[in-house]
């Protein structure tokens, strides 16, 4: 048996051989299907298994070192993409077309990018975060970013989130006014004004979130000149929920949570909003503080992965997610022009 370690806990498995089919793509996995016999995962709801789509070669921890066959390589699939629609649907596509702009992965254990700073607002006011000027000897990038569709929030060190929240508040008039009148710290004001969104955000109308400044994540690839500005409008980095459910979101940023969130529910059905961020420390010598780029990026972009390049590469395309076709390979049809128009429509209804 082998032990697989994840951020949510460990899985105990035994090695087996069987045919595996994903959306019509089939292959025989020789000693590559791991049957789960025990788990200690901090996951709510049903859990049936994991389809590994990471960079090939990552080791499974525990017992003798074992490197299982990769489904994509065994099935002769080198490219895939992942994206989410508003609501419960999304799409995993295998065998996708070559992306237009590539960013080589800087990670060896994870799909990873360099993060060379974050800007806020239409003027792209640069925050004192992940600056190349602050790099220490031996660092390859100021910060690192791991695009992860399995992490709900964007995770970063607490001090970095405080700087980010302050920067958002500086560029958001409603937050700045609340901070001055209430005598609050800007980061605290940002979280509290969002939590009170039921008083200023109309039901089903995401236009109110256009008040929030866009965030610009400046990511880089492994090669010189590989860089991209990943923009997240307000509706991509805000969660809408109820006061009853707020504790599930706020447990990741309790330092900034409103006092009522710590005391318990007062109006359980009241609509509230929360920042789609959470606290996590993952310092590295080579890439500085690592940020987990969670589901917000998979709603905003169709995220492409390419194993055929050296190193493996990623791309972020502003195109509609769409739905999976019934045919094999999960490849959708339709022109790029059509998908870009749909992508703009999708952005305008992010909160619905």
Image (cartoon, grey):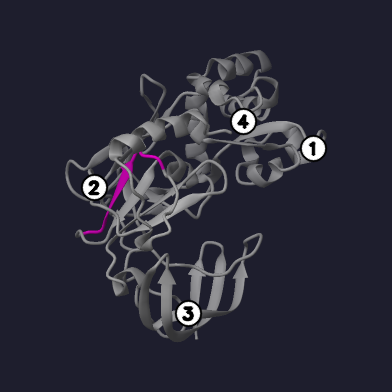
Residue at horizontal 49%, vertical 74%?
A: 4
Q: Quick one: label 1 or label 3, which is nearer the N terminus?
A: 3
**Is-magenta flag for residue 313?**
yes
**Is-magenta flag for residue 219?**
no
Looking at the rendered structure, the secondary structure element under dot 4 is: helix
Q: Are marks 4 and 3 in contact (CB under 8 Å)?
A: no
Residue topped by disc 1 = 268
Looking at the rendered structure, the secondary structure element under dot 2 is: loop
Q: Which residues are magenta?
A: 311-320
Residue topped by disc 3 = 34
Residue topped by disc 2 = 102
The CA distance from mark 4 to mark 1 is 18 Å
How many neighbours does mark 4 have within 10 angstroms: few (below 14), some (14-19), or many (20 or more)? many
State left or right for residue 257 relative to residue 131: right
Label ID, residue 191: 4
> Farthest left residue?
224
Q: Are marks 2 and 3 in contact (CB under 8 Å)?
A: no
Q: Quick one: label 2 or label 3, which is nearer the N terminus?
A: 3
The CA distance from mark 2 to mark 3 is 32 Å
How many marks the image carries: the answer is: 4
The CA distance from mark 1 to mark 3 is 42 Å
């Amino acid at each position: 048996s082998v032990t697989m370690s994840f951020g949510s806990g460990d899985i105990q498995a035994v090695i087996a051989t069987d045919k595996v089919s994903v959306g019509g793509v089939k292959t025989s996995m020789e000693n590559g299907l791991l049957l789960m016999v025990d788990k200690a995962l901090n996951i709510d709801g049903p859990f049936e298994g994991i389809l590994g789509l990471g960079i090939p070669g990552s080791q499974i921890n525990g017992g003798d070192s074992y490197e299982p066959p990769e489904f994509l390589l065994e099935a002769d699939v080198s490219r895939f993409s992942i994206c989410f629609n508003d609501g419960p649907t999304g799409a995993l596509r295998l065998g996708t077309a070559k992306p237009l702009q590539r960013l080589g992965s800087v990670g060896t254990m994870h799909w990873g990018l360099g993060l060379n700073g974050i800007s806020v607002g239409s003027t792209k006011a640069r925050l004192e975060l992940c600056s190349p000027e602050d790099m220490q000897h031996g660092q390859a990038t100021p910060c690192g970013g791991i695009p992860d569709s399995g992490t709900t929030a964007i995770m970063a060190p607490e001090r970095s989130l405080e700087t980010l929240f302050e920067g958002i508040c500086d560029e958001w008039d409603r937050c700045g006014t609340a901070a001055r009148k209430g005598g609050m710290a800007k980061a605290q004001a940002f979280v509290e004004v969002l939590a009170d969104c039921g008083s200023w955000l109309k039901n089903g109308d995401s236009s109110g979130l256009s008040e929030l400044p866009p965030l610009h994540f400046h990511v880089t690839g492994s090669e010189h000149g590989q860089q991209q500005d990943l923009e997240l409008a307000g509706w991509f980095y805000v969660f809408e929920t109820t006061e009853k459910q707020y504790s599930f979101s706020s447990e990741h940023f309790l330092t900034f949570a409103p006092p009522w969130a710590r005391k318990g529910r007062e109006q359980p059905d009241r609509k509230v909003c929360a920042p789609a961020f959470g606290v996590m420390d993952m310092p590295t010598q080579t890439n500085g503080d690592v940020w987990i780029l969670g589901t917000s990026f998979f709603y905003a972009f169709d995220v492409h992965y390419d194993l055929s390049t050296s190193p493996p590469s990623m791309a972020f395309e502003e195109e509609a997610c769409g739905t999976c076709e019934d045919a094999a390979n999960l490849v959708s049809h339709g022109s790029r022009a059509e998908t870009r128009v749909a992508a703009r429509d999708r952005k305008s209804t992010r909160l619905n």
